[in-house]
Image (cartoon, rainbow, N blue to C red):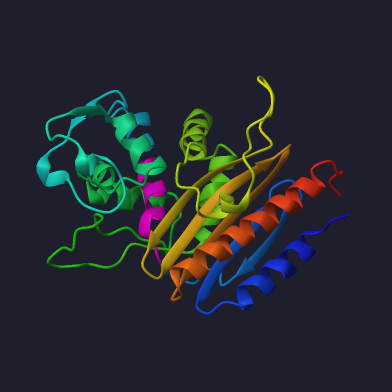
Amino acid sequence: MYRMKKLTARIQHIIENTNGKWGIVLEDLDRNERWYWNANEPFYAASVIKVPIMMAVFHASHNGDLSLDDELQLKQADQVGGAGVLQYMTPGIKLPIYDVMMLMIIQSDNTATNMLIDLLGEPHIQQRMVEYEFIQSKFYNKLMIVPAVRKGNNTITAAEMNAMLKKLALGKVISAHACEQMIAILKKQQIQDGLPGRLASPEPSYFGGQKDWEIAHKTGNVQGINHDIGIFYVGKRQLIASVLSKDMDDLVARNTIQLIGREIYDYLHITKNESVC
């Protein structure tokens, strides 16, 4: 049988041939096997912080503080650079909170993110992260804006990102329905140059067929920082991967994350018909 030990040995060989620092956690949910590599090393969060922000939005909706159908108006002052389309849209347009949140995740839209931060307030997001048992992972600042007084950097660890995704996969954040909605959003991710970057299209060759694989994931990329965290679904197999990197060439880092994603897919594909033991 194809054991996770073989998978992790291959991944360890891949990352040891790069310069820089890696933080990785893999968790096979079906076999209850885990692998850690610098799991508690803090990394600059980049856009991965948008997943806890999404969770905070759903929490506020669940509590009745807002409705996902409520509309937010785009202001010129909201528009910031980096990823996303809202920076190019006409100020004054209105979008439902749900759509703004969708843009934040699937296009990693920084303007959308900051609109949601303003809506919730930084203390609300920070409090939710405490409730979700984040200890080392912290949220302090809006994106693409350098405050006059910076309290700290938005930070994450592979261990806490893995724990967060596991709670989503098990329906243990807010409600099972909220978890289903959040995973559905993460599956619509349009930035595919990370973990799924070397996988063939999952679409079936005929109408009505099942996809070969899916991944609910979120990337985070700035110069020298490249992350991807997600839940792989291959057949009936499920595995969580939190892959964080820093201090290396961006092309090398992204290529390496793609190689890791391919190894994970191959492992799940080979073992998808094996009995759990």
Image coords of residue 95 (percent x, y): 24, 28
Do we see residue 205 in this rendering? yes
Do we see residue 57 in this rendering? no
Quadrant occupied by the N terminus: bottom right
Q: Is residue 230 above or below residue 38?
A: above
Front residue (pair 250, 167): 250
Q: Does residue 46 show up magenta in the picture?
A: yes
Residue at image coords 34%, 30%: 98
Q: Is residue 151 left or right of residue 211?
A: left
Image coords of residue 218 (percent x, y): 46, 49
Farthest residue to the front: give it. 205
Among the 4 quarters of the image, the one containing residue 105: top left
Q: Is residue 101 left or right of residue 36?
A: left
Residue at image coords 36%, 59%: 46
Q: Does residue 85 show up magenta in the picture?
A: no
> What range is drawn magenta here?
44-57
Farthest residue to the top: give it. 208
The tally of labels here is 0
Residue at image coords 59%, 46%: 231
Image coords of residue 87 (percent x, y): 21, 44
Magenta: main secondary structure: helix
Image coords of residue 259 (percent x, y): 63, 61
Front residue (pair 230, 223): 223
Among the 4 quarters of the image, the one containing residue 258: bottom right
